Amino acid sequence: MNKLVSKSLQRTHGKNFLLCHLSLFLIAAALQMCSATMAGESSHIIAWGDINYDMTNDVAQSGSSIAAIASGDFHSLILRRDGNVVAWGDDRFGQSQVPSMLNRHGVVKIAAGNVHSLALLGNGTVMAWGPSGGMYGDYGQAAVPTDLKKVKAIAAGGTHSLALQSDGTVAAWGFDAYGQCDVPPGLSSVVAIAGGMYHSLALKRDGTVVAWGDDTHEQCNVPAGLNHVIAIAAGGYHNLALKSDGTVVSWGMYGLGECDVPPGLNHVVAIATGDHHSVALRRDGTVVAWGLNGAGQCNIPAGVKNVRAISAHGDHTMVLVKASRK
């Protein structure tokens, strides 16, 4: 895969830690996987870690609140409660160019991969943008299958895309050199999906997890006996599973600490993964992060609280914080 598309461990990790604080006027972002988490209140964003490609943008457009966030490799998305999507950051592949017609269709969910973006519309169809027409980095990840419909969830891997359909089955498209788009035959009763760099995950209704694609780092080797799972997240080469008791299980690449779940971590309500780091949101609105920290992606800023959603990708982390009442 092209180096501009596939992240590597040679990324510069000497960048200074950066905290960007949004109060309806300034968003600073720095990338997750790939999925977005909904929140109901008027909110703002705090982001930290690697912010290559000037990943800041004035997104003050209307007074509407932020409903969801999603992080790509070097770009980020927000979904406003009025159904409008805003994107910023790296745009070499068109991943930050929100289609002009998108915001006319009532977007309900968003996701971001390395160089592409996805949106789920209220009518159950999917729109995607990013590489196209043979552009460098185009592996078909933004070419939504024409027969795809009745979708209820989306996920973006490094350069592939996933859709969960209303009948509990999964569709996948894009880069497939490692089988990340080869959905296991007979897979059904799926309630959640996640995409890693070259692998995919599905959470079944019975609380078990299925993985397929690249298994170089055993990221598709789901731990024996793993059950009671309520959420999943796929990083570059590792995975997280959130159990119903509020604990987290991880597997895959261990070399950079991304799978070293902090001892005693509990009361977790959401999880997210970057390429080589992991993030957990606790019930009290605080955030815990672990793994590679060369760009400060695990350096949670002092005073961060009242977090309602988390997102991570590449070497950065972004959180949605409930706005304080004056």
Image (cartoon, rainbow, N blue to C red):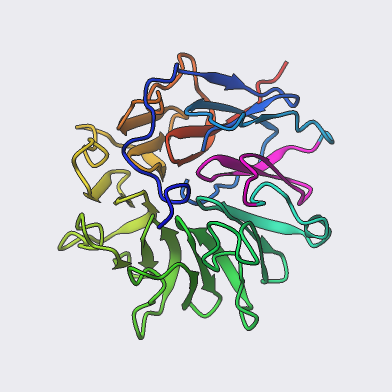
In the rendered view, does 169 fall on the left or right side of 96? left
On the question of residue 37 being in view, the answer is yes
The residue lying furthest to the left in this view is 224
- The image quadrant where one finds the N terminus is bottom left
Foreground residue among 122 and 236: 236
Is residue 88 within the magenta segment? yes
Does the stretch in magenta take in 318?
A: no
- Identify the residue shown where x is 38% and y is 34%: 11
The magenta segment is 64-93
Q: Position of residue 43 (x, y in %)?
A: 66, 31
Q: Position of residue 292 (x, y in %)?
A: 30, 32
Quadrant including the C terminus: top right
Residue 38, above or below 48:
below
Q: Is residue 239 visible?
A: no
Residue 293 drawn above or below residue 109: above
Query: In the picture shown, does residue 53 fall above or below 250?
Result: above
Number of marks in the rendered image: 0
